[in-house]
Structures are given as C-alpha cells and as structure tokens.
Image (cartoon, helix red, strand yellow):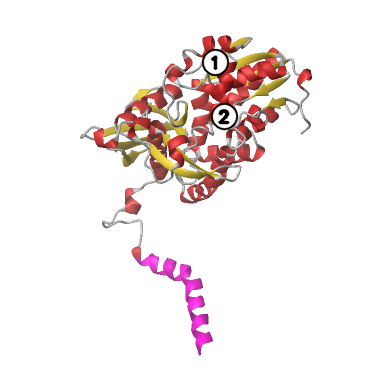
Amino acid sequence: MATIKKQEIKKIVLAYSGGLDTSIILKWLKNEYGCKVVAFAADLGQGDELAPIREKALATGADKVYIDDLKEEFVRDFVYPMFRANAIYEGHYLLGTSIARPLIAKRQMEIAAKEKADAVSHGATGKGNDQVRFELAYYHFDPSIKVVAPWREWDLNSRQALIEYAKKNGVPMPTIKKRPWSSDRNMLHISFEGGILEDTWAEAPEEMYVLTKSPEKAPNKAQYVEVEFKNGNAVAVDGEKMTPAQLLAHLNYIGGQHGVGRVDLLENRSVGMKSRGVYETPGGTILREAHSAVEQITMDREVMRIRDSLIPEYAKQIYAGYWFSPERLMLQTLIDDSQKCVNGVARVKLYKGHCRTVGRKSETDSLFNLDFATFEKDQVFNQADAEGFIKINSLRLRIRSLMQANRKK
C-alpha cells in the first residue's frame, strides 16, 4: 500500500477506548497529521469504563466524540449468529474479542461516511490480531479508505516511551495504579493478556478476575438454570422472555456467581506467534452448553456431523477477521438452515466453576423416540437386524485383515 501523505488527510475517525494507548494515539494524530480527529467509542457493555470517555477525549484534543450504545446489535447480530454455529477457537476460546471488532469497525465506517472523513484509525499493535480484524472490515465497507495505524508508524516502542510522550503532551494519565496486564471487555467476555501473564507457567492471580467469583468461594449449593431456544437463539431464561442483550447480561451474572467461564489459553495468533490469553465468559459458557443440549435432542445426526466439521473453519474465520467475507456468509447460511429445528429448553447445573447439562426437552422438534431407544421390550426395532448392519459395516475391516493374513503366508 502506498504511503499516506499526511497533508492529504483532513479528518480521521479513531476507534477510541479511553485508555492510555488510544489517548496517546489521539494526541499523536493531532500532532502528526494536523487534522480533525473524531473519537468513537462503542458501548458493548463495558460498564463504568465508558463514564469518563467523552470528557477525556475532548480534553485530549478530540474535535467530536461519538459514544454509541451497540449492546443489542452486538448480541443479536454478532454473538447469536456465532453461537448458532457453536463456534470455539482452538477448543477453548469463545471469541469474545474477535466478534466485537467487526461491529466496532462497521459503526466506525458509518461515522466516517457521515463525517466525510478521509481516514480511520485504531489502537491495535502491529503484532496483534485486532489490526487485521479492524482493517479487513474497513476495506469491506470502503475499499478506498485510508487507514492510519500508529503502532506501525511511530517510534514509541515501549511503555516508558508512551508514558513520557503522554506527560510531554499533556495527555491525561490514569489515576489508578496500572495493573501488570491489559484487558478488554464487552458483554460476551473480558480478556486479559500481557504483563505477568507472559510467564506461561505462572497461574493468573485471583485479583485479575472481574466477572467471576473464585470457584472455591462460589456457593456450596448448585443452581439450575433453564434456557429456552427458538431457531437456535436463546429467548428466555427460567421462563422469562428477554432481549438478547438482557439475556446475556443475566446469564453473565448467574454464571459469574458460580465461577463459571474461566479459560487460560496459549493461543495461536493470526500473525503467526503464540500468545497467552485469560478469559472470563460466564454467560457465553452457559449459552453454548445449553444450545448444544437442545441440538442433541432436535438435530439430525448427519446434519450435526457436517455442521460440527465446519466449526474449526468458521471459528478461524472470525478469529482472523473475516466476518464480512463471502465464505463466512456462505457458512452462516448453511448453519442457520440447520437451526430451524433447534427449538426447546435445556436445563444446566452450575456449581463451583462447572456448567453441565442435566436435562433437555423439545415439545415440537424432538427426535428422541422412547419406542426406538428403550432398552425394554418394544415393537418397532428387531434387535436381530443389528447382525446384518454390523456385518455390512465390518466388511472393509474383514477384507483388510484377510489381505494382511494372505501376505504373511
């Protein structure tokens, strides 16, 4: 890509979190590009973190500030489609950060169009996954958009250099003591990385966790939760109908009380290096377990087998930033078709960090038939027929063994 001529940029929309890094980036953009900067923060459920953002952005030099509530859109149009696929990355990660980036980028590009901005910017480092996720989405919405990625341009290559730049340029510094790790939060999860977590042998300290109680300190009594699904989407908890965002927030609270949803993972980043991430996803853990339980009773075996074979590819597409790609949309169409029958209720048991299914039912789409499955006497299945089934399915194994025996003679 050709180098951006700074004098050509008149206005930049920055994805702004209010943290030290994006605050420094905001000031750096003003200093280096000498243009207007619009700060945009997406409310995806960060809670109190958003309270000081507008004032902080304006104090740092922003010409305009957007803080948009995207919680319902986030869960309805991004989290739910992903959970219809039972997506999980490398067997553990429920993609909480990955799935937030395309929505942030989408709204950022809408603001860029509204503000007639020449460029967009983000605070992702040149080593991480987020730069890829943001920029693939940017180019989806506007192939000609200019992208300013400060971490790939500036010489502020250490935490100390960033702090010195902030002090020199009057960037408001955090008033609380800096914790030795970084975090990112939304309605689906909170992630932690860097700092003390770079020692892969060291256990994450208990003080790190925000959404979940320690399993050792969780209630000594189990809690049962019933989650109802319609077309693969959760619509009610314990009989109470809720919007997608309300439902996820409710499950986050319940799961957090029981220490559910903690993950410590050494994952493979898109750019090729390994990175340790610690995640809390209480509501998402319950949601995935319950969704899988309803699928067990409603989904055809071969449909499930094909869908399950696609989970690693689907999850990789989200992790790598290809949410808006034709291949993800193609898979989503297939996955959503498989969910038309996923209607029912799952009952899960929460206890001391564990979340497991203990019951499932479907009044309209159950494929479980007691007449077929019972171990008692029945009239619909002749057990003697199994002999022919076994002989046909063992044919290739028997032929292989005979051939091996003949070679030894």
Q: Residue furthest bottom?
A: 409
- Res 169 → quadrant: top right
Is residue 400 one of those drawn in magenta? yes
- Res 256 → quadrant: top left
Q: Amino acid at mark 2?
A: Arg
Where is residue 146 shown, x and y percent of the image?
73, 25
How far, Cα to Cα, is label 2 from label 1? Answer: 14 Å
Q: Which mark is residue 101?
A: 2
The relative height of residue 241 versus residue 56 in the rendered view (above or below) is below
Callout 2: 10 Å neighbours few (<14), some, many (20+)?
Answer: many
Horizontal side of 265 relative to 42 (left or right) equals: left
Looking at the image, which is closer to me, 179 or 214?
Answer: 179
Query: Is residue 342 among the parts visible in the rendering?
Result: no
Q: Earlier in the sequence, mark 2 or mark 1?
A: 1
Residue located beneath label 1 in the image: 68
Q: Amino acid at mark 1?
A: Asp
The boundaries of the magenta stretch are 384-409
Horizontal side of 51 relative to 21 (left or right) equals: left
Query: Is residue 14 among the parts visible in the rendering?
Result: yes
The relative height of residue 385 versus residue 105 in the rendered view (above or below) is below
Q: Residue furthest left?
A: 220
